[in-house]
Image (cartoon, rainbow, N blue to C red):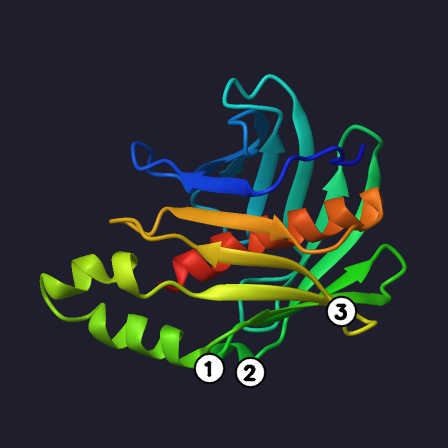
């Protein structure tokens, strides 16, 4: 199964009423694209992507391929067609200063990179976020953005954290057209990245 005919921009909106890291993905018209749930209390990351909030159909599964650490990578699996799309790999120590991830296809060939646009936004978000009371409002004015580039050097997608009290909303725009299967690979990678980056603050 592939995610296709999507009306951009897509909104990733986290729920604040659950302990788990759950979020909805909707298109520009407010139609459901998917509902994402990260399983709690797992030593390895385990994420299920459902058709909507009813959780009546599992579409995709994302699982860490090793214990949680700086170099974990995450396999992206299609549950409908029972196949592997590829994996998202975090770029180890470089990700401490500025988020950087590789997206690889099912044959483990590099296809795309996700890079945070400004290391300073991350720095100030972390610094100001520790200040009592003031830190509660960083979600309104310190909002990172990420660019997805292909091996051809072109920018294909832009993901932005939108101003909000709990930093719970992200918006994804497609900049140029892309093959449906590669589009699904990128979207699955980005939703996993959002969970990882949000957990880091």
Near-viewer residue (189 or 89): 189
- For disc 3, the neighbor class at 10 Å (few under 14, some 14 to 19, many from 20) is few
Which residue is found at the position 79% from the left and 36% from the top? Answer: 2
Which residue is found at the position 37% from the left and 35% from the top? Answer: 15
Callout 1–callout 2 Cβ contact below 8 Å: yes
Residue corresponding to mark 3: 154
Q: Name the image quarter holding residue 79.
A: top right
Which residue is found at the position 66% from the left and 48% from the top? Answer: 187
Count of numbered circles in the view: 3
- CA separation, marks 1 and 2? 6 Å
Residue corresponding to mark 1: 97
Which residue is found at the position 54% from the left and 56% from the top? Answer: 159
Near-viewer residue (180 or 110): 180
Across and down, in percent, residue 98 comes to 50, 78
Near-viewer residue (167 or 39): 167
- For disc 1, the neighbor class at 10 Å (few under 14, some 14 to 19, many from 20) is few
Q: Secondary structure at mark 1?
A: helix
For the C terminus, the quadrant is bottom left
Looking at the image, is mark 1 or mark 3 nearer the viewer?
3
Where is 68 relative to 119, above or below?
above
Q: Secondary structure at mark 2?
A: helix
Residue corresponding to mark 2: 94
Q: Is residue 76 left or right of residue 90?
A: right
Across and down, in percent, residue 195 comes to 49, 52
Q: Residue furthest left?
A: 133
């Amino acid at each position: 199964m592939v995610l296709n005919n999507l009306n951009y921009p897509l909104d990733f909106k986290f729920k604040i009423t659950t302990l788990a890291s759950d979020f909805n993905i909707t298109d520009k018209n407010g139609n459901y694209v998917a509902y994402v749930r990260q399983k709690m209390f797992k030593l390895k990351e385990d994420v299920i992507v459902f058709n909507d909030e009813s959780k009546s159909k599992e579409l995709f599964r994302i699982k860490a391929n090793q214990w949680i650490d700086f170099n974990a990578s995450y396999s992206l699996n299609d549950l409908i067609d029972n196949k592997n799309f590829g994996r998202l790999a975090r770029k180890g120590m470089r990700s401490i200063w500025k988020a950087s991830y590789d997206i690889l296809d099912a044959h483990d060939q590099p296809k795309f990179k996700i890079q945070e646009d400004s290391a300073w936004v991350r720095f100030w978000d972390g610094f100001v976020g520790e200040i009592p009371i003031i830190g509660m409002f960083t979600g309104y004015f310190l909002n990172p953005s990420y660019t997805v580039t292909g091996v051809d050097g072109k920018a294909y997608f832009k993901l932005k954290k939108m101003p909000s009290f709990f930093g719970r909303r992200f918006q994804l725009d497609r900049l140029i057209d892309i093959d449906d299967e590669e589009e699904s690979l990128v979207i699955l990678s980005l939703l996993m990245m959002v969970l990882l980056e949000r957990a880091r603050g």
